[in-house]
Image: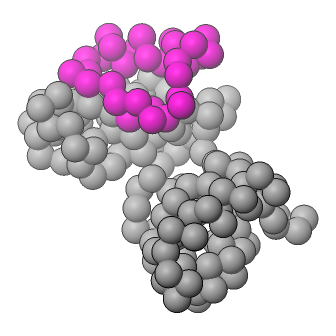
Amino acid sequence: MSETIAFTPETLTQVHKITARYPAERKKSALIPVLHLAQKEFGGWLQVPVMDYVAELLEIKPIEVYEVATFYSMFNMKPMGKFVLEVCQTGPCMLNGSDEIIQHIKETLNITAGGTSADGLFSLKTVECLGACGYAPMMQVGKFYHEHLTKEKVNEILELCRQGTLALD
């Protein structure tokens, strides 16, 4: 990113509202929600200069931001497709076939886990528990869970994405 990194005035107002929830000496407590804002505003992923900007705003060391951003799968460390398919790969989902769902997505989109389709529309992430074990196998696309997945359901979801009719927010 060669341009100056700064939140829009509207987003900066949101950041100030978030940081105001915490004591002045505990601005770091606002890190996760501020990273969500940063990821949304700066292209769907967190480049190092963006994380450095967040560290400056919160008056913490950049390493403290990097540690959190790289720990949680909800943050992207590289450009992602418009639709990020986050497929759970922990025990209950695997026992119910998430490995087959992941393989189906890889073959259908010709991508690897962590990769993005040639058209830039889809990225595949394998993630740890998304907290819907009773509905396995499942994946998250945007803010929504898609449960009891089958290859046919995955194909329907992919088609809705292509048509632009799948809600992300």
- Picture layout, residue 76 above or below residue 58: above
Q: In the rendering, at what x and y percent does residue 134 appear?
A: 12, 32
Q: Nearer the viewer, residue 58 or 1?
A: 58
Asked where in the image residue 3 lies, by quadrant, the reply is bottom right
- Picture layout, residue 148 above or below residue 137: above
The quarter of the picture where the N terminus appears is bottom right
- Picture layout, residue 104 above or below residue 52: above
Identify the residue at horizontal 49%, vertical 74% (top origin).
22
Q: How is the image coloured?
A: one colour
The answer to whether residue 111 of the structure is visible from this angle is no
Asked where in the image residue 76 lies, by quadrant, the reply is bottom right
Q: Nearer the viewer, residue 72 or 152?
A: 72
Q: In the rendering, at what x and y percent does residue 87 appear?
A: 33, 38
Per the rendered image, the range of residues in magenta is 140-169
Q: In the rendering, at what x and y percent does residue 144 appear?
A: 41, 30
Identify the residue at horizontal 33%, vertical 14% (top origin).
153
- Picture layout, residue 146 above or below residue 126: above
- Looking at the image, residue 57 sits to the left or right of residue 9; the answer is left
Identify the residue at horizontal 15%, vertical 38% (top origin).
133
The answer to whether residue 36 of the structure is visible from this angle is yes
Q: Does the magenta portion include 1?
A: no
Identify the residue at horizontal 54%, vertical 79% (top origin).
27
